[in-house]
Amino acid sequence: MNAVGMMQDFFKELFEQAKAILLPPKKTYFAWQTLLLLSLFSVIVAAILDALEPNGTPLSVQVLSTLSWIFLTSAIWWALSKDQNPIKVAGFSISPWITGAVLCIFLFQPRTPTRLRWALSCWPMISTAIKALPYFVGWELQPKKVKDKDLQELVVTTLVTLLITSWILFHFRVQDWVSNYPSLLVSGLEQSSFVYDFDQGDRDTRTQGVRLLEGSADAIEEDLDDLPWYQTERWLVNRQEQMERVSGSALRTLDAPTEKIFWRLILPVPRRLGEGYLITLRANWLGPVARDDGFYLEKSCRIMPKDAVRQIPVEQDKPLPTSKLTEVTCEEIIPAVKWIKPGGVNG
């Protein structure tokens, strides 16, 4: 047999198999294949109407698309029902879950993160309802009395489904916490018994306190650099009032603005460093943590006087007068997290 003949036999066999699957049994049209064909027909007609009017989506296209989804969901449910061809994993039928997934895609159209969240959260309960429906209603839409054995199975399935739904909702809640309060990741999730960070390789786990300290240090440099020394000393005396202004500006630059309520920026008493001072900015985290009592970050800056020549006319052969200005130098290393151990001991 030549290659052309083999190809013809292959496509003929493929066509016969598709025909056997898609076409309803002879002498009856009351079958899931009929619903599947109606779904395909609705999609084709909707596509033709949409192509004829590309500038708008007429009501007929929306109606046909909706009918197509209804027919498809019904066909899948019917085809995978326990009386037809149920799909089982470890003896447990997952057919209702497949039907529930298709129905959730139809109902929620998860094209956005919010819709996807709703679809995944409702999927287990919708699947359980699909599983339970045949036990309560027959094919003639007549109510049925549930057997005690089946009722026990439905109760256990419902409880397991509620647990799965709770875990899905908890997953999204944790994602919201991490998105709104990224400094929570400083604690790390490696030791957690019920939370795993799937994005730990791509996620920036640096706390927002780093940005807060760096922004505050830049603001202090801008305030004090080249300022007359006597004004700098006055600034240091009123440092608490100055830090409220500086921290307010720095908090507005955070990537996660909702996190700012958990940060407190303080400036302890400056230490003498020769003729100048050494100040240590400290950002305290007051939010929840997974260990100990909390953490903080520090960044040090040197504030030193420098002599600057005063550009004023003087008599010839006399040295130019000088005045003391301010020079601010902050350390360039990234602030590291320091933990506060129980009892207030810094670690």
Image (cartoon, helix red, strand yellow):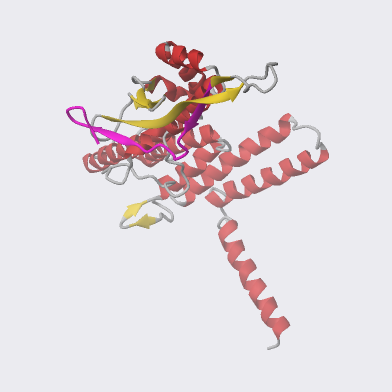
Residue at 33%, 25% in the rendered image: 287
Looking at the image, which residue sits at the far front?
317
Q: Nearer the viewer, residue 320 or 315?
A: 315
Looking at the image, which residue sits at the far left?
343
Query: Left or right of 311: which side holds 335?
Result: left
Q: Nearer the viewer, residue 17 or 29?
A: 17
Where residue 181 sits, quadrant-wise, is top left
Where residue 301 sits, quadrant-wise, is top left
The spot of residue 194 in percent (x, y) is: 29, 42
The spot of residue 226 in percent (x, y) is: 57, 22
Q: Nearer the viewer, residue 65 or 77?
A: 65
Q: How many marks?
A: 0
> Looking at the picture, does residue 49 appear above or below residue 254?
below
Query: Left or right of 106: which side holds 10?
Result: right
- Magenta stretch: residue 278 in it? no
> Looking at the picture, does residue 11 appear above or below residue 310?
below
The spot of residue 228 in percent (x, y) is: 54, 17
The spot of residue 146 in percent (x, y) is: 28, 37
- The reply to whether residue 191 is visible in this rendering is yes
Residue at 67%, 19% in the rendered image: 311
Q: Nearer the viewer, residue 247 or 224?
A: 224
In the image, which residues are magenta?
Answer: 325-347
